Structures are given as C-alpha cells and as structure tokens.
Image (cartoon, rainbow, N blue to C red):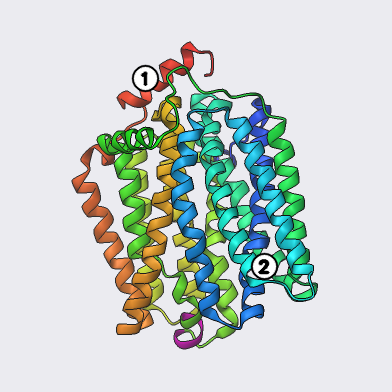
C-alpha cells in the first residue's frame, strides 16, 4: 500500500452522508445544534456573573441544571422507546426554541432577572435531556449496520465542530454586543435544527416496545448491568472521567504552574482540537473489530496523557498532552458508541441512551470535585498527575474485572451478530 493509499484510508468515511438522507439531516441538525448551544453555554454564566458578581451564583446554575438532566434523561430514554422518535425531536426542539427566546428577551430587558436564567436553565436542561436519547437512538435506524462506525465518527465530528467554534463565537458576541445576541444565534440554530428534524421520516416504536414507565426504566437498567460488554462501556468511562478530569484546575494550572495566564483559553481548547483531529482522520475505525480493547487502551491513554501534563511546566508539552488526551477520549467515545448501536435492540435503545447520559454526566462531575479537593489538600500538579496515574490503574483493573468487555469482538459477539442478522432480514443493511 502506497503512502497516498494509507493517507486516503485515514480520511473520515462519509458514506452515511451519501447513502442516507435522514442521517444527513441528523448530522446537519446536530452540528447546528451544538454550535448554537455552545454559544449559549458561554452566554449563560457570563450574564449570570455580570448580574450577580458571584462565582457561587454561577456554580449553582450547574446544580440547577443537573437534577432535571438526570431525571428527564432517564424518562426521555423510556419515551424514545415508546413514541415516534421524530416527534420527540420536533416537539422538544420547539420547546428549546421558545425557552431560549425567553432568555434572549430577558437579556434585552434594562434589568435582566437572574431568577429567569435559573428557571429557564433548568427547563432547558430537561428539554435537552428528553431529546438526546431519541436523537442517539435514531442513528442506527438511518444507516446500515456496517456503516455505524462511520456514522458515529461523523456525528462526533459535527459535535466537535460546534464545541470548538461555538465558545469562540459566544465569547466574541457577549463581549462585543451582549448576551442577547448570543441567545439569538442559538435561537436561529435551534429553528434550523428543528426544521431538519421535521423533515425526517416517521420512526414509530418497534412492536416489542413497552409503555414508558419507571418500571421500563428499571428494566433497561437491569439489561445494561446483565451485559458485561455494555457494563464495561459505562464503568470505563466513569472511572476515567472521575479519576482524571482536570478541567476545573485549568485556571490554577495556567496561573500557578505554567505561569502563563493567557494560555487558559488554549488549555480549554486543546482537548477539543485533539478530538477533532481524531474524528477528521477516523477512516481506520471501520477496520477495527475489537472495540472493547480499543476503549480500554484509549481510556488508559487519556489517563497517561493527563499524568504527563501534570508533570510538566512547559506550555507546549502540556497543550500537546491535553490534545492527545482529547483524541484518546474521542477514540473511546467512538467505539463505545459503536458497541451500543451495533448490539442494542431497537426496543431498548432509547432507555440505554438515557443511562448513557448518566454515565457521561456523573463521571466528569465527580471528577471535578475530586480534582479540586486533591488540589486544595496538596497541589495542582499533584492532583493532575495522581488523577492520570489512578485512571490508568483503574481502567486496567476494570478490564481485568470485565474480561468479556476486553475480549469483545464485533464479528463474533452474539448480540452484534443477532442485531446484524435482524437488520439484514429487515432490509436495513
């Protein structure tokens, strides 16, 4: 194979965009959604801080948003298995348009109300939590079984574009023209995304779907725990994020350790750059079949890169380490997504997507607390380095405990084989 052929093999596989109009709509809607959402992500704390002058008030916004995220994420997963997922996307999209417009109007008032930001932020979190399981669960319905690695990579690429460009745009808007303009951009993005959702085909629940209830949510949780391959995807991610999530330490790292406060923005964006590079060169992912091993190795690489970053006082080395960590985290996310989409029956996919929301929310939140406590007790560098080392140990220990996850092979796994055969019989492969 020539060098040109090898480079061509690294290019992101765009086949799902060409073969599936509905996946193309989901991809475009997701990209616009994340771009606008990240603009508001910057505007909300910025406006709240300028209204109150309190860092505690800004931190409380995260607490207010977390509770509905957990509760409605689980309920949204149950609904995604019981109703037409297209309708869920449309109506939750409409709700987000209205709620973000309220934030925009509040920001335009001569004296904006802080309580409006808290109240609308909580309801917006609930609407987003209701929507996400349906959006995630739709991906396997729109592409062939063998196209799922490419579809997951493309979806991640669209999200990373929004995550990278959105905060930069939001920062420029709030400082130059104010929070209202930032919310207006988000409203436009949400209108576009909701319009794209409305153009999707109908996706009614499968015949095996059960009515949405807390009992059905418990059934989904029991199913997730009973499958050690799925359990591995949740546990590895929680362990990695809980032990090696240094984001809360970036201000102190830039000021006290690197002695370069102006690098703070670069620290925040380094991981996203690494993630974007991985998704842009993700053509190789379709040729990997040992997905469990890929998740374990990449999660351990995340921890190792974070540990090295904590040992260094060189700005370039630290930025490269966090870029590598972001890339490794994206590899883990891609293969976790492939396992979920290739092995979970459609009748369970929404509830499992709701549980997945919990796994990626609880780990980082707990990780921020752990990082802060260790940094205050010892030092910033100790917190970052120890977290990275413990992450490597924890991930490898999890792999030793869940051997079925480590040995997972998409070509032979009974759940993957059964889902592949079912989709082939239904003409979706």
**Predominant SS of the magenta segment:** helix
Quarter of the image where one finds residue 373: bottom left
Q: Position of residue 41 (x, y in %)?
A: 62, 63
Quarter of the image where one finds residue 391: bottom left
Q: Kindly tell me whether residue 351 is visible in this rendering.
A: yes
Residue at image point 41% right, 50% down: 358
Seen from the viewer's position, the closer of residues 113 and 423 is 113
Q: Earlier in the sequence, mark 1 or mark 2?
A: 2
Left or right: residue 379 versus residue 133 is left
Residue at image point 34% right, 58% down: 240
Residue at image point 67% right, 73% down: 47
**Magenta region:** 253-257
Question: Between marks 1 and 2, how big is the CA–CA gap?
Answer: 46 Å
Seen from the viewer's position, the closer of residues 420 and 370 is 370
Q: Is residue 127 above or below residue 196?
A: below
Q: Which residue in the protein does label 2 denote?
A: 43
Left or right: residue 403 versus residue 357 is left
Label 1 packing within 10 angstroms: few (<14), some (14-19), many (20+): some
Q: Position of residue 368 (x, y in %)?
A: 40, 69
């Amino acid at each position: 194979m020539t060098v040109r052929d090898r480079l061509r093999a690294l290019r992101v596989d765009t086949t799902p965009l060409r073969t599936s109009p509905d996946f193309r709509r989901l991809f475009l809607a997701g990209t616009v959604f994340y771009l606008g959402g990240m603009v508001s992500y910057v505007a909300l704390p910025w406006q709240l801080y300028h209204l109150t002058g309190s860092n505690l008030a800004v931190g409380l916004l995260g607490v207010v948003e977390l509770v509905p995220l957990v509760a409605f994420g689980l309920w949204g997963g149950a609904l995604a298995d019981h109703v037409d997922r297209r309708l869920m996307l449309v109506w939750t999209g409409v709700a987000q348009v209205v709620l973000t417009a309220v934030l925009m109007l509040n920001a335009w008032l001569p004296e904006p109300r802080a309580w409006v930001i808290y109240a609308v932020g909580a309801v917006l979190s609930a609407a987003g939590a209701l929507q996400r399981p349906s959006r995630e669960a739709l991906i396997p319905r729109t592409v062939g079984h063998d196209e799922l690695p490419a579809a997951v990579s493309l979806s991640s690429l669209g999200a990373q574009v929004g995550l990278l460009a959105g905060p930069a745009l939001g920062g420029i808007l709030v400082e130059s023209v104010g929070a209202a303009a930032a919310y207006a951009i988000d409203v436009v993005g949400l209108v576009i995304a909701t319009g794209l959702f409305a153009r999707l085909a109908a996706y009614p629940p499968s015949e095996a779907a059960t009515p949405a209830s807390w009992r059905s949510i418990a059934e989904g949780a029991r199913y997730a725990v009973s499958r050690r391959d799925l359990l591995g995807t949740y546990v590895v991610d929680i362990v990695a994020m809980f032990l090696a999530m240094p984001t809360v330490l970036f201000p102190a790292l830039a000021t006290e350790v690197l002695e370069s406060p102006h690098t703070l923005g670069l620290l925040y964006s380094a991981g996203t750059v690494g993630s974007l590079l991985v998704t842009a060169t993700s053509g190789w992912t379709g040729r990997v079949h040992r997905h469990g091993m890929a998740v374990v190795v990449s999660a351990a690489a995340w921890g190792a890169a974070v540990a090295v970053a904590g040992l260094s006082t060189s700005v370039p080395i630290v930025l490269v380490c966090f870029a590598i960590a972001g890339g490794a985290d994206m590899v883990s996310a891609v293969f976790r997504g492939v396992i979920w989409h290739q092995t979970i029956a459609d009748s369970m996919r929404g509830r499992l997507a709701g549980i997945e929301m919990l796994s990626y929310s609880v780990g980082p939140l707990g990780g921020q607390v752990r990082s802060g406590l260790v940094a205050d007790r010892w030092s910033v560098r100790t917190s970052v380095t120890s977290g990275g080392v413990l992450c490597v140990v924890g991930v490898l220990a999890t792999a030793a405990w869940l051997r079925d996850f480590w040995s997972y092979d998409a070509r032979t796994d009974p759940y993957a084989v059964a889902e592949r055969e079912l989709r082939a019989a239904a003409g979706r492969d």
